């Protein structure tokens, strides 16, 4: 196979020489080739966005709106106050309203924020946020119009001095662009915030996978938010703030050299405005200072003064640069791009609805996966009134968002299943993947880019670095629980011994009276005294002692 | 909240009256809002397309190319002959070549077929095909350029009378458009077909999740294809054709009224060229003839002569039309849009590499889910040399493509797990979700639109109609196996009884001689004769009899 001469000349020759080829099948097939708009794609594949079963459609819609509200409030340093109302329109259709006290959405961008898929502010930013795709809320709009035929109604006010504007819009699926149906002003809307109102085919349910459960778990991991929910029976539930302090706002960072892909690096080299490789390296990446930059260039055998665009042409040079990124010691990425929940609040969350006998929390140091800083937090609670019907219960959280579906497909679950729980004094029947007993395991993965298995953000993909960190975090917490359980067992054994000993104290004292001549009452009192001193902590109570452990790994 | 006056007048008034509002946070936030190209999106989320672990990246790439080759060959009625070669470039990079004898890709569309995500010929067609998204092969190109920095090289010839053209191309991720790097001709390429060559970061492995396993299973469910594979150690494996007949080509159909969404129906009404509702209904849908059309319009209280565009404005009318679609009896969709494997070939597939004692196959009738016709086929094999290390083994197939990952997240698995296998005389320990023993379960879901949980097409989403059909199919096959196992048990019990009886025949005969006066040798012979007659089928052999069962439900 030797390529012939290229270019338009060869082409012209061929087309002149050969018969007009309308016979080949390929020509017929080519006529059917067509671009597919991303809106069309997701309309057909809406289950990928979390719009599959009717109960779930409601949860997904509420989730996307609440995620956006929390992100927007935190970015603007506003304590979130979110109101959700669900009403029945008819047997098939629910009316859903989500209102927040956030910064509002500016008029020019509003139609696209709600009416265009793959449009957003957080996709290109390297910092922890709930939304990262620019798909979520427009997916809800898409689903609403598909099933109710009605547009969505958005009200937003960005300044108390300005009126709110009210838009009714749909998505034109063929172009993936918003289609405005009406545009109004509203002077009486709340002083600042956004309100979304949609009609959609959905079912309201209660139970383990429900809006209520999602909001409850959201409140646990976002204790700074007040969330009000009015259900279709007009019952109002308020999840009050557990603290009045906003979490520290994660700061946007530059990409870290570890884990950057070759193709991405080439693209960055091509498109940079920097004239020299040296400035490109120090200005485009996190944690590359002057000294590190020098070492990298030296290791890669590259001239710091060379033009980045020239390097982009030389794949071998780029490969050497990539290798140097790995070889030269570079500091871990700054952790202020992440917003961990912290051990205290994890503890608060897990014990808010439960009395527990023991709880252990772990925060792992920041790590990097494919250039994305991430950290894992874990908590294990045991005993008390935890009733998990045998098997340990798992709570999965990603960037402060509780994950409700696809537990079996999630890296958190898989990491937990890799652990031999018997090593930590827990019961695990042969073949069972989870420990048994009154155990709750909560894992929070915080990352600048959580690798979800699909757009519906139900499960975290099995990225080895991530799974390893999750396993380490859970193991650390499990070790504490294991120690506690061992002590409990020891205490139980000791109590048994004491009880047995106590039962024979009198007989023993009488026997000793014969040997020593001392009064058996005195001996008995002395024996009891010894028992009391030696086993004091086991004697008074059969109740296990409540214990806490916290492991904050050095970061 | 009363909306104020709308329109430009109100807007002008507000902007004149109020101070220039550069203060609100929303204005700052708006500046960050940006459209995200679908290529950028998937570059960042490549794991959603099946490009996560290094061994898997290779499988996904081969799979996408082979799927395309099989689809293209079948559409053109060509017996597929596919060649795959994997070579090591260096420690990190593999070179992958996939070549087919298909119709080739026409010059004008080729760059976008390989260099644009969401571009294809099968997305809008309602019929069974492997590819349906227009993402797969361009995703491989995207991943290859990201990790190797190199363009992909495509050679294609659509007619032996024309030379092949050779393109080197990349995807411009910011625009999601192909970028041609070179364009040549090649006179010596095979007479017709397409060749793809990529360099990508990937690892070649063997075992359960490997290219070899994928190709083996692909050959099983596509017995009309010849597949040649050359591995990095230059070993060549040929999966020869098991039959020389192409499967019947599925025919493109119109949407079926059952399961059509309200929003889709409105869109169809808006964009149709038909002037009357009557012609719109009969021309736009499958299985709406004149009589059915009349009944539907009557039931919906709609004038058949009305303009579809007028109806599109009247949501209540559209809703009545939807309700009538459900109420009026409409024939099931034509099944020729599907291409089942059929019981015989399923049997052939499962027994190709195994000797089995029993096999049962089931083909369920065509059903509809959200307007998409689908059918389920199942096969269960038992015994022989099947060694599944205890637990039953599941083979999942969707539109003739074996699914390799995410078994735990798949509707096929979930449907199988819903079954109480003890009812079918199989072992299933408490808590175990699968039956135990030497059992293989194969399920094929054929649909005009398989609802995969993500773009990587690993697992089928839990759509209730689909899961129910899968369960029914597997149950039917399980019933046959259950009967077989019960007979086996009965035979075993009978054999035990006979053996016991035989052991005492002589004693019995002697005792009967005393009673009857007959010679005991004669009595013994008679007794043995009775035994032989009555239990003839159990006497000669301890081997279970090989049995087959096939259930083809009336369609």
Image (cartoon, coloured by chain):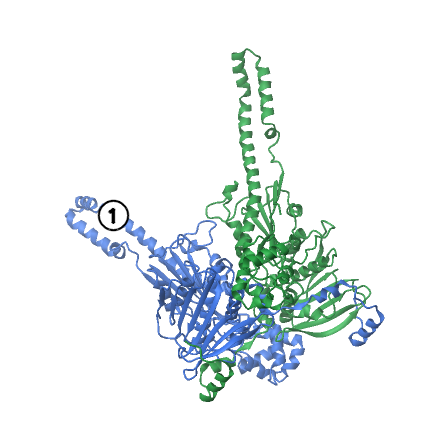
Chain colours: A green, B blue
Q: In this view of the protein, which residue sits in the foreground, A420 or B285?
A: A420
User: Dot 1, crowdedness within 10 Å: few (<14), some or many (≥20)?
Assistant: some
- Of all chains, the one bearing label 1 is B
List x then y, in percent, for residue A426: 52, 42
**Picture mark count:** 1
Query: Can residue B147 be seen here?
Result: no
The residue tagged 1 is: B501
Quadrant in the picture for residue A189: bottom right
User: From this viewpoint, which residue is outermost toward the right?
Assistant: B17
Q: In this view of the protein, which residue sits in the foreground, B478 or B23?
A: B23
Q: In this view of the protein, which residue sits in the foreground, A20 or A48?
A: A20
List x then y, in percent, for residue A47: 57, 65
Query: Can residue A158 be seen here?
Result: yes
The N terminus of chain B, quarter of image? bottom right
SS at circle 1:
helix
In the image, taking residue A51 as reference, residue B393 lies left or right, namely: left
List x then y, in percent, for residue B493: 31, 51
Residue at 35% x, 70% y: name it.
B242
In the image, taking residue B230 as reference, residue B108 lies left or right, namely: right
The C terminus of chain B, quarter of image? bottom left
Q: In this view of the protein, which residue sits in the foreground, B77 or B475?
A: B77
Residue at 57% x, 15% y: name it.
A520
Quadrant in the picture for residue A58: bottom right
**A463 relative to A105, above or below:** above
**A419 relative to B66, above or below:** above
List x then y, in percent, for residue B150: 51, 68
**A17 relative to A324, above or below:** below
């Amino acid at each position: 196979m030797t390529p012939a001469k290229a270019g338009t000349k060869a082409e012209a020759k061929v087309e002149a020489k050969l018969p007009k080829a309308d016979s080949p099948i390929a020509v017929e097939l080519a006529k059917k080739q067509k671009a597919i708009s991303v809106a069309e794609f997701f309309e057909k594949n809406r289950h990928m966005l979390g719009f599959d079963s009717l109960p779930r459609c409601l949860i997904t819609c509420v989730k996307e709106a609440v995620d956006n509200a929390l992100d927007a409030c935190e970015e603007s340093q506003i304590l979130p106050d979110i109101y959700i109302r669900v009403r029945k329109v008819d047997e098939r259709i629910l009316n859903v309203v989500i209102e927040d006290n956030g910064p509002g959405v500016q008029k020019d961008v509003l139609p696209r924020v709600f009416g265009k898929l793959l449009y957003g502010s957080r996709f290109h930013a390297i910092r922890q946020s709930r939304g990262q795709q620019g798909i979520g809320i427009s997916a809800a709009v898409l689903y609403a119009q598909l099933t109710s035929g009605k547009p969505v109604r958005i009200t937003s006010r960005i300044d108390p001095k300005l009126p709110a504007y009210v838009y009714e819009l749909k998505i034109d699926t063929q172009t993936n662009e918003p289609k405005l149906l009406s545009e109004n002003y509203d002077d009486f809307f709340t002083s600042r915030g956004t309100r979304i109102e949609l009609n959609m085919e959905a079912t309201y349910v209660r139970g383990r996978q429900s809006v209520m459960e999602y909001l409850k778990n959201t409140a646990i991991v976002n204790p700074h938010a007040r969330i009000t929910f009015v259900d279709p029976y007009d019952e109002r539930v308020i999840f009050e703030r557990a603290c009045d302090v906003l979490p520290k706002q994660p700061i946007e960072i530059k990409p870290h050299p570890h884990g950057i892909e070759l193709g991405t690096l080439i693209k960055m080299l091509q498109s940079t405005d920097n004239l020299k490789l040296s400035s490109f390296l120090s200005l485009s990446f996190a944690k590359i200072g002057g000294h590190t930059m020098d070492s990298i260039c030296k290791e890669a055998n590259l001239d710091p003064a060379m033009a980045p665009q020239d390097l982009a042409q030389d794949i071998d040079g780029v490969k050497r640069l990539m290798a140097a990124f790995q070889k030269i010691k570079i500091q871990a990425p700054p952790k202020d791009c992440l917003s961990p929940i912290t051990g205290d609040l994890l503890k608060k969350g897990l014990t808010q609805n439960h009395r527990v006998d023991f709880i252990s929390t772990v925060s792992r140091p920041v790590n990097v996966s494919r250039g994305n800083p991430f950290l894992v937090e874990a908590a294990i609670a045991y005993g008390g009134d935890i009733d998990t019907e045998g098997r340990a219960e798992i709570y999965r959280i990603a960037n402060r968002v509780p994950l409700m579906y696809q537990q079996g497909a999630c890296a958190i679950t898989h990491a937990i299943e890799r652990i031999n729980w018997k090593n930590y004094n827990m019961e695990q029947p042969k073949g069972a993947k989870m420990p048994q007993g009154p155990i709750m395991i909560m894992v929070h993965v915080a990352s600048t880019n959580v690798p979800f298995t699909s757009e519906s953000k139900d499960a975290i993909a099995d990225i080895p670095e991530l799974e390893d960190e999750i396993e380490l975090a859970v193991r650390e917490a499990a070790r504490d629980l294991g120690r506690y359980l061992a002590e409990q067992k020891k205490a139980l054994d000791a109590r048994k011994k004491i009880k047995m000993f106590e039962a024979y104290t009198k007989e023993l004292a009488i026997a000793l009276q014969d040997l020593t001549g001392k009064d058996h009452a005195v001996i008995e009192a002395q024996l009891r005294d010894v028992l009391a001193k030696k086993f004091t902590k086991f004697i008074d109570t059969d109740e296990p002692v409540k214990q806490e452990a916290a492991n904050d790994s050095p970061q």
